[in-house]
Image (tube, rainbow, N blue to C red):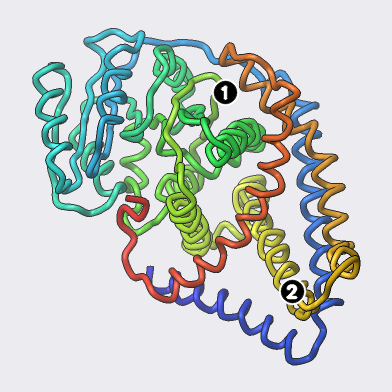
Amino acid sequence: MKNEKIYVRLFLFAIVLAIVLIILFNIAKPVRYVLAVISFFIVFILSFVFIYKLISAQDTVLRDSKKSYDKYISFVIPVYNEGDDLRLCLDSIENIEYPKDKYEIIVVDDGSNNPITAQILEEYSKKYSNIKIIRKDNGGAASARNLGIINSNGEIIITIDSDSIIDKDAPAKLVSYFDDPQVAAVTGSVRVLNPDRPLTKWQSIEYDIILVYRRILEVFDSIYVTPGGLSAFRKEAIMKVGLFDTNSLTEDQEIALKLQKAGYKIMATLDAFAYTRVPDSLNKLVKQRVRWIRGGIWNRLKHRDLLNPKWGNLFIFGYVTDLIFFIPFITFFLTIFLFIIDNYIWFFRLGPEVMFLSIDHFLISTLVFWIILLPWQIFMINVLREKANEQKVKIKEIFDFIGFMIIFGWAWFLVWAFVIYKELTVQGNRWETR
């Protein structure tokens, strides 16, 4: 953990140093265009690979899940200072289409200090006989999950967030994949519960696209995250690799890398649905994304032995590809920053000069790329909606896609400023979004 933080800080320091040198040598414009070309080349190649695989392996990527009811399940739910969403979560589990004598619910209270959580847990322990409550001192979501798993009786562990609602047939679909003894984990299809405003609608688009993207990664045996919102694990496998890493900010990603390094397979569903409440304010969203980025960097450093071609597709898609995706984010952010530096007097200009100054080759290239990518994004969303028995994308929703690509997409770059701040000032890594 200590070594990872040192490497991350060196990495961030290198970015800051590069910016300072660019300013000192007055080379913002050429550097800006070089970075833009590199970024678009990377994104274009990766997009081509995934779109090609989506077409060539369509039967595998778009398959429906089977159902199985023959394994005992333990649902493990870490909780901390919860509200009414926890009631919805527990009720949704109790209403699943699965034999009542073949599952248990383990709720691990990670040191909550609000009275509502205690009240809900007391109420539901009386309401349902198959709910087990475990209380512990605050230590983070990973430690809570680990304690729940250790005290579970299930052959299959299903982890679900306390603000998620699970579909009735999702557990049976998840369990069906464990007929293959090599399968250690199966990811659920986590979608957005509250797409009622632009910020959450854009996250809904993002979540659905990620689901199809993850299914394509399955074809390459390179799924690099088992989302906490809904994932299933073979208990024997997760115990063998040492459970979740309590020092990781994104333990659901770290466990996926660890399981595959141990020789297990991870599968992905497109129709075992859970619906989760996503951040509805900019402050909450930034906290979440900062944690994701920091956790991703730390995990890549911890598992840097994956940076070896001997790991095959896991090396290419589970490590390098995800790492490469950081390059466009970093370079796009830098190009914006360097654009401002290069034209620092823009706010003194009036009239048409401001308009011409704003027309930049990089911005034009970005717009073209968004237009090309839009049909594929709509296609992937429709795949999910068809499986969820929802209406396909309507014409008026195109504006949401544009907002997602332009406003929401660019916001990722601004998050990096907070990432740098967090890495330099914060030591803890507990429930950072609470």
Image coords of residue 174 (percent x, y)? 45, 21
| 107 relative position to 119: left or right | right
Q: Determine whether 122 is above or below 101 in the image.
A: below
**Residue at figure coordinates x 26%, y 39% from the top left:** 78
- Residue 373 visible to the viewer: yes
| Quarter of the image that includes the N terminus | bottom left
Q: Which residue is mark 2?
A: 340
Nearer-the-camera pick, 264 or 46? 46
Relative to 254, residue 18 above or below:
below
Foreground pick, 262 / 1: 1
Q: Position of residue 424 (x, y in %)?
A: 44, 76
**Numbered disc 1: secondary structure:** strand
Q: Amino acid at mark 1?
A: Leu
Question: What residue do we see at 40% from left, 38% from top?
Answer: 228
Label 1: few (<14), some or many (≥20) within 10 Å? many
Whole-percent x, y for residue 279 in the image? 45, 43
Residue topped by disc 1:
270
